[in-house]
Image (tube, rainbow, N blue to C red):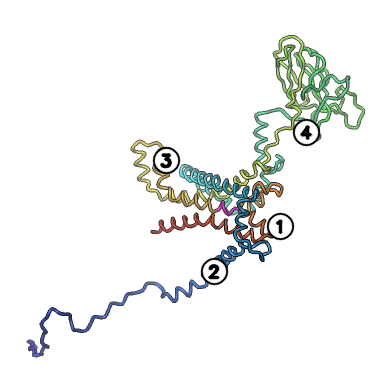
């Protein structure tokens, strides 16, 4: 014991022997836990996990089990349903259509979204443009299918697509078709049919009006108020009139222009010389009259080409077997292009402007800046959009079911729709339908994992 200056005594200090300390061990530090305890976290996660098991895990497991049995569910067939998927001709068509969807639709949606996102940075009314392009996202896929079913109507008076095509066609072509129209039979008629065309029986000369009576004109292509020109019409050269030689109510004369008979506008008329070459071309006016100008003197055969008696251009058969898949892909692009544009526009806003300005200062063109700087910096967002679109195309159902008529649904079929048709749409084969569901899950799963990994990389 040693005595301190204040009179107190201290215990003697033991000398160190180099061995381990025999004093009392220090208590370990208590680590502070952030957030709730594991028990609280489990309590909150349990309802969600329970619902996830009921609505996701159980259906997957049951579908896998059910796919090993036949339509009745009593006979075990093993992998027979999966063999049917890859051997049945209808199933192979379905897989081919899904492959077309996966290859084409995501590329178009991603490219359009990128173009729209870049262009919106250069215009003043960018907000209004984004609103218009994104607006289809507010419409359900079933409603979008109904809209495009009307857009693709073959009748130009009902379908917007063919209305646009026929309007463009009519802008560059003034000819009007009169299908099933023909000259009157008999020796009294001044014209006759020849290889699908209509020609005059006698050569025509300047100063002598050429009369070409036509019958068999359909009411739907008949002009509304087009009184035929008088028979003595003359333009000073080779001229004439083409009219519908029929008087409503009777009493008219054959091969003569009677009151109330209508001219046929928009018909192409050719003046054919004695050598068989076309010397001039004219088009009938609203009253059916025509006139050639600048023809050399001589006699000519007046001919109405076969094109006059073909149906006028009515657009494309969008809902036919040939175009049905591209038509539905067009509707899909209309719905999802706005989604891609918004994501890519957000990615563009995050790109450092210094890099773009530095490239422009160094002399790079806008195309070089876009290709070598913008696209590489935007590649993570582009990949997310592209993979998301692949998942959406693999799951597409509503658009195909609504747009494609029942007569062409086999040609437009996809895996998701075939799964429903086989199971509940009349096939009543839930074994094969479950196999299709598992097959679709296998197709979607890799892309979902890819997206999840991409999201995790973005968070880290």
Q: Secondary structure at mark 4?
A: helix
Query: Which contiguous range is marked in magenta?
Result: 392-397
Q: Which mark is residue 426?
A: 1
Which is closer to the viewer, label 3 or label 2?
2
Magenta highlight on residue 15: no
Task: Report crowding for label 2: few under 14, some 14 to 19, many 20 or more residues within 10 A (C-alpha).
Answer: few
- Are the residues at dot 3 and dot 2 in contact (C-beta closer than 8 Å)? no
Q: Is residue 235 left or right of residue 364?
A: right
Q: What is the quadrant of residue 282 in the picture?
A: top right
Residue at 36 percent across and 74 percent down: it is 33
Q: Which mark is residue 221?
A: 4
Q: Position of residue 369 (x, y in %)?
A: 40, 40
Which residue is identified by label 2? 53
Residue at 65 percent across and 57 percent down: it is 420
Task: Report crowding for label 1: few under 14, some 14 to 19, many 20 or more residues within 10 A (C-alpha).
Answer: few
- Disc 3 versus disc 4: distance between alpha carbons? 53 Å
Q: Secondary structure at mark 1?
A: loop
Which residue is identified by label 3? 371
Q: Viewer-proximal residue, 71 or 362?
A: 71
Q: Viewer-proximal residue, 454 or 230?
A: 454
């Amino acid at each position: 014991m040693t005595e301190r200056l204040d009179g107190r005594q201290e215990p003697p200090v033991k000398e160190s022997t180099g061995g381990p300390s025999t004093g009392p061990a220090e208590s370990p530090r208590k680590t502070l836990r952030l957030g709730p305890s594991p028990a609280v976290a489990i309590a909150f996660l349990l309802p969600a996990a329970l619902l996830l098991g009921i609505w996701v895990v159980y259906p997957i497991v049951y579908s896998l089990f059910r796919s090993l049995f036949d339509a009745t569910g009593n006979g075990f067939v093993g992998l027979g349903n999966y063999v049917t998927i890859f051997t049945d001709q209808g199933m192979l068509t379905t897989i081919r259509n899904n492959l077309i969807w996966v290859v084409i639709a995501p590329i178009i949606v991603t490219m359009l979204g990128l173009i729209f996102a870049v262009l919106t940075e250069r215009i003043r009314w960018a907000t209004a443009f984004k609103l218009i392009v994104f607006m289809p996202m507010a419409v359900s896929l079933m409603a979008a299918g109904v809209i495009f079913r009307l857009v693709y109507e073959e009748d130009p008076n009902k379908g917007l697509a063919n209305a646009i095509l026929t309007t463009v066609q009519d802008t560059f072509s003034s000819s009007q078709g009169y299908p099933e129209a023909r000259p009157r039979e008999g020796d009294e008629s001044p014209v006759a049919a020849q290889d699908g065309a209509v020609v005059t029986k006698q050569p025509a000369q300047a100063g002598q009006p050429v009369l070409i009576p036509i019958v068999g004109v359909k009411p739907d292509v008949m002009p509304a108020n087009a009184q035929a020109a008088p028979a003595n019409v003359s333009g000073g050269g080779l001229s004439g009139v083409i009219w519908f030689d029929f008087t409503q109510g009777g009493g008219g004369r054959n091969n003569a222009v009677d009151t109330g008979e209508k001219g046929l506008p928009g018909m192409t008329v050719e003046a054919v010389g004695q050598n068989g070459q076309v010397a001039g071309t004219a088009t009938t006016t609203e009253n059916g009259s025509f006139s050639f100008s600048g023809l050399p003197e001589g006699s000519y055969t007046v001919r109405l080409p076969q094109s006059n008696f073909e149906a006028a251009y009515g657009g494309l058969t969008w809902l036919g077997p040939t175009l049905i898949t591209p038509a539905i892909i067009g509707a899909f692009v209309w719905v999802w292009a706005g989604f891609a544009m918004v994501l890519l526009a957000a990615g563009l806003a995050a790109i450092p402007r210094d890099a773009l300005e530095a490239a422009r200062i160094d002399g790079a063109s806008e195309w070089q800046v876009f290709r070598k700087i913008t696209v590489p910096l935007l590649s993570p967002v582009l990949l997310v959009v592209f993979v998301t679109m692949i998942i959406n195309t693999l799951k597409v159902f509503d658009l195909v079911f609504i747009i494609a008529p029942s007569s062409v649904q086999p040609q437009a079929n996809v895996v998701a729709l075939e799964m429903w048709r086989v199971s509940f749409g009349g096939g009543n084969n839930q074994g094969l339908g479950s196999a299709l569901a598992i097959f679709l899950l296998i197709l979607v799963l890799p892309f979902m994992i890819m997206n999840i990994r991409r999201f995790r990389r973005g968070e880290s």
